[in-house]
Image (cartoon, helix red, strand yellow):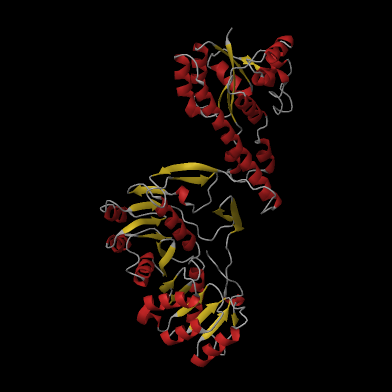
Amino acid sequence: MKKRALVSVSNKQGITEFAKGLIEADFEIISTGGTLRVLQDAHIPAIAVDEITGFPEILDGRVKTLHPFIHSGLLAKRDNKEHQSQLAENKITPIDMVVVNLYPFKQTLQKPDVSKEDIIENIDIGGPTMLRSAAKNYQDVAVIVDPADYQHVLSSLQHGELSIEQKQRLAAKIFRHTADYDALIASYFAGQTGEDFPETYTITYEKNQSLRYGENPHQSAAFYKRSIPEQGSLALAEQLHGKELSYNNIQDANAALEILAEYEEPAAVAVKHMNPCGIGVADSIETAFQRAYDADPISIFGGIVACNQVIDLPTAESLSDIFLEIVIAPGFSDEALERLTVKKNIRLLKLDVANEAKQGHTYTSVNGGMLIQTKDQGRIDIDDLTVATTRKPTDQELEDLLFAWKAVKHVKSNAIVLAKDKRTVGVGAGQMNRIGAANIAIEQAAEQANDAVLASDAFFPMPDTVEAAAKAGITAIIQPGGSKRDQDSIDVCNEYGIAMVYTGMRHFKH
């Protein structure tokens, strides 16, 4: 008795060659709709599903395989006498293989101006049901969802049968595939209904690449991407030069891109260990990078630089003078690319960087669970500031205060950023107390702290940070405010003629 394969695919890639191989392996094929027509056009014998079920495809194809003659043929155990007796009694033929892939829901979501009706119509019902039925009974039914598996399946059939181990691996892929498909649909509906934190939270990622190791050489790792990455995602970058990215490279590069999204004018961001060591903005990318470099010419060594403008030759000349792991930009001029690729180990990534912070969520794993929060999109402009001191900041100070406030948002808490002339001059990150972060930033800035401004990610519980700022010559401060001892810091500011403004918003980053 011939074996029977049910073939119904949305992605027709390679299906005629695979179907011919099945015929040669003594299978008969049943099929549906468009797949049936493709097989018939290729002169491959195939039986219409409605000939098997005795029931026509109805509801514009919404119902065609949801029938006991199909699913009994898939779910019946071959070694169960009662199952086999029931098949014989109802004249149902077992199905030995299912070759199905699903309506292109993800591709439909990505279409410009797509209608809700089109999105809903591309939610597959019969396909996942057949896949799951076959995968549940994998001991008796081979199930294939990925055209990449066609060749090795045919090769095994040419040498006999698929092993139980092969069938189990194929079944495991099915459940991953349908889980991914359902997660994408669930995410779409959660977005439509505005549910940030539903009762269950399902997200899905696709493997982008295996990595040599994780944070340390004894850890294994891989890089996964969202099914539909947003603009500016590192997963969309085109690598033009250099060896493959490491786990730490990806972490640092992502941090640089998130910081870069804060600035609309030409900007350059240098990152080391996920903290900015230099940020500069200017009228040209050459000057912006020079400002970022001058902020901390020591820490930038071995770091990552991200720019929001095409890299030209003068900027490339400056970049090539130092050792960098990665340079990310929307593009590189031919001359810049030629200059930078002289350096064997530098990685060059081309990416349309985001020009504003994106909505969405951040995820942090904890033992046995996960923390989920909306992204920190809090932005402040001049009208949102409250002047707390007798002296108001000058226009130049306000520019630098807002610049520094965007930067401190991306520095690990406790965080202090000093800035002057649209560049950072000192960064204090990840300290257990705020005065410790301030002292690091002031020491790094040295004489550049004079006439600089200071941004703090959270309020001052005591006036020691303000006193240190005053001694360093800092002229203006931006901080959230809200401490019970705010007045102590205000008094010190007034004593030294420092302007201080409140944002009413903190930027903890743990």
| Of 492 and 120, the residue lying toward us | 492
Instruction: For residue 298, say whether it is visible.
Output: yes
Residue 28 placed where, x, y %?
58, 12
Residue 323 placed where, x, y %?
29, 60
> Is residue 6 placed above or below 452 in the rendered structure?
above
Residue 135 horizontal side relative to residue 209, left or right = right
Quadrant where the N terminus sits is: top right
| Residue at the farthest bottom position | 495
| Residue at the farthest top position | 1
Q: In which quarter of the image is residue 273?
A: bottom left
Residue 4 horizontal side relative to residue 314, left or right = right
Q: Which residue sits at x=53%, y=10%? A: 26
> Is residue 468 placed above or below 217 in the rendered structure?
below
Instruction: For residue 420, say whether it is visible.
Output: no
> Is residue 42 placed above or below 205 in the rendered structure?
above
| Residue at the farthest left position | 342
Q: How many circles with numbers are drawn on the protein?
A: 0
Q: Which residue sits at x=64%, y=48%? A: 201
| Of 208 and 72, the residue lying toward us | 72
Q: Which residue sits at x=43%, y=81%? A: 452
Residue 486 horizontal side relative to residue 161, left or right = right
| Of 350 and 246, the residue lying toward us | 246
Residue 365 placed where, x, y %?
55, 53
Residue 260 horizontal side relative to residue 120, left or right = left
Residue 407 placed where, x, y %?
48, 69
